[in-house]
Amino acid sequence: MASFVLRFKPWVALAWIALSIWSVATVNKIGPRLDYTYTTPGEVGYESNRHIEQRFGIDPEFEAMLPVLDLPQGLSMSSEGAALAAGVFSALPKAGVLCYADYANTRDSSFLLDEGRATWALVSIANPDFGAGRGVEGRIEPTLSAATPAGAMLTMTGFAKMLSNAGPNRANLMYGILAGAGLAFIALFLVYGSPIAILPIVMAIPAICVTFFCVLALTYLTHVSYFIEYMVVVLSLGLSIDFSLIIVVRWREERVRGLENEAAILAALQKAGRAVALSGLTAASGLLSLIVLPIPFLRSVGFGSMLIPFVAVCIALTLLPVTLAWFGPALDRFSLWPRAATIYSRGWEGWARFVLRHRVLAAATGLVLLAIMSVPAWSLKAGMALIGSLSQEGPAAAAFHRLQDSGVPSGIAFPIYLMTHGGQGAATKATSIARNTPGVWSVLAPDNACYRRGEDALLTVIPQAEGSLDEGKAVVTTLRQELAALPGGPAWVGGATAGDVSFSHAVYGSFPLMLTVVSLATLIILTLSLRSPVLAIKAVLLNIVSLGAAFGFMVFFWQQGHGSELIYGMSAAGAIRAWIPTIVFASLFGLSMDYEVFVLSRIREEYERTGSTADAIIGGMARSGRLVTCAALILMITFLSVSIDPNQIVKIMATTLAVGVLVDALIIRSLIVPALVSLMGRWNWWGPGFLRRTGGTLEK
């Protein structure tokens, strides 16, 4: 393949350039074709929400919109101010498909603020991303503002509003990509001391563009979640740089040995190209493991994310050799320091000797560190983040705090919706039961067409606690039990909390299957490549342990808030969205396995040459330690640079991936792996006869 690529260099380059240009020209077509739903078919919470949506038009899983209206000076809700407020909120249906509850249609005094000088409403909307409700969220504020008379002031608040004030923002993500690329170049230049460091950065540009184009093509074959856009941004830059870095480093090593440029390219691809392909395969298998979960949203992320390492590998094995053939020697002619031209590191050689002398202590120390870091992971709570962990700046946050100061609980952000079927009698009984349920603050039951459809009625229950807390989830469970014997049949109990409970059940009920599938797939791949089931089993087990440490950081830093406010200005989230840990798991499982491949491939190569396990560890670490550390540093930089986006979800994912990669490279691959390989001695190289007969090493 390398010979073919070098024989047709202009055509290979032209093909990638054309694909990149086409990708840029069509990138705006992706957004409208993406799916914005979180479906869990068969789960009771999901089915309840779909029944409510089909009957009343609103999406119960979407957060409530909360407009707060300050009346003109001198007016009060006990006088003509009530009619003014009713007139403002009556304009809401002009924005689109929605239902609203306010003082006028409930006469509930909880809608009064500041002794009647202000009021608010609870607005439930259709899904704003598709169908009849498309765009309704964005039209509510302009519609109300147009209806607000002079002297009055309108402020929108709620979970969605506070979250949208902080993103996600494509401009922020673009700044993150640029910052990550710049910092990665600085790191590469300082380590390798040559302008050749720019090549891995350059390779990332077509990789990102073409990956987006592949995602667009995938949308014509199946539903693809909107979240794939952020996966491409978070993963593509770092993976493209890392894969290209492996080839460039090996090319420089072959050049130092005296090979001419094209011969060095061929040798680099023969030896490092397969390692890159294998790394891409393990990364893709980790991401593809999401398809075993019974959730279309996560399955689509799995299919789409698989394209990221695939494109990165293709770039590294085709476009990069062409670029090295044309520009490699010129870029590498200047060097800040001569020793930067070789991958062999005396420092890593010394470290490997130190680990071997204290192998038992090194293995024990590394495992204890990982165990300590993993402890918080056992406290992981799945659910929506507490509203107090969102941005607390701006009018939306101030308005929400104002509601809380007036006695409105934070549970207002995620109401519980009840749909009864037995006419007014069933609605009245359900209202009474709900109001007497522990943990319920209020029940809103406007008697108008929006909340009544024949014999069916829609009730809005406001819990005291947010749905991410156990108390909030308990209200859903209790209501489902208490409303099972109403006239007309059991009530459907829906809302964001009910949906989250169902989502978590579907995800984590199938998580053992996901773990088994990805572990077996990786085990088979590594066994066939390393020709050692012992090394493969050890690699998979250590990978799982390192993931525990990453999850421990996620819980400790974000859920419990130890450092998140100091660094990012966000208090404890209280819970982690149910799908974030699964995507982090799938991403990290493949990414961290890359380093196992790099290290063990070199150790195996040295063992084939020397026949000594100790010499193989020392030589392998000396030749791979610096590369693995640099690759991990670059991935960490790219992940952390994306975390400048103010959206909490992006921050949680980016920082957890960064810490996971760093822990894996510094503790697993640099400390535990050499220690355990040394302790296992000749057993490392045991394998069935058919594996030994395959011949060659991973990089031969």
Image (cartoon, rainbow, N blue to C red):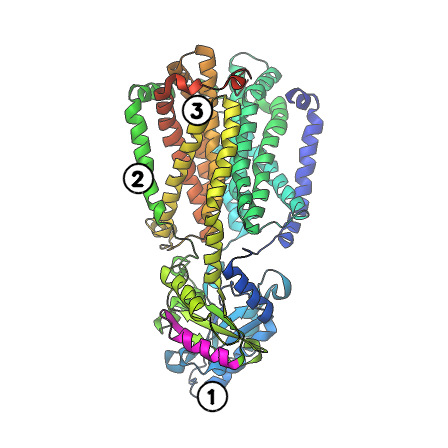
Q: Quadrant of residue 436?
A: bottom left
C-alpha gap between disc 2 and disc 3: 26 Å
Quarter placement of the N terminus: top right
Give the residue at mark 3.
534
Foreground label between 3 and 1: 3
Give the residue at mark 2.
372
C-alpha gap between disc 3 and disc 1: 81 Å
The amino acid on which the numbered mark 1 sits, given as a three-letter code, is: Glu
Is residue 446 covered in magenta? Answer: no
Which type of secondary structure does the marked residue at label 3 adopt? helix
Is disc 3 surrounded by few (<14), some (14 to 19) or many (20+) residues within 10 Å? some
Dot placed on the residue nearer the N-terminal end, 3 or 1: 1
The amino acid on which the numbered mark 2 sits, given as a three-letter code, is: Ile
Q: Are marks 1 and 2 in contact (CB under 8 Å)?
A: no
Q: Quadrant of residue 374?
A: top left
Is residue 425 covered in magenta? Answer: yes
- Bounds of the magenta segment: 424-442
Which type of secondary structure does the marked residue at label 2 adopt? helix
Which type of secondary structure does the marked residue at label 1 adopt? loop
C-alpha gap between disc 1 and disc 2: 63 Å
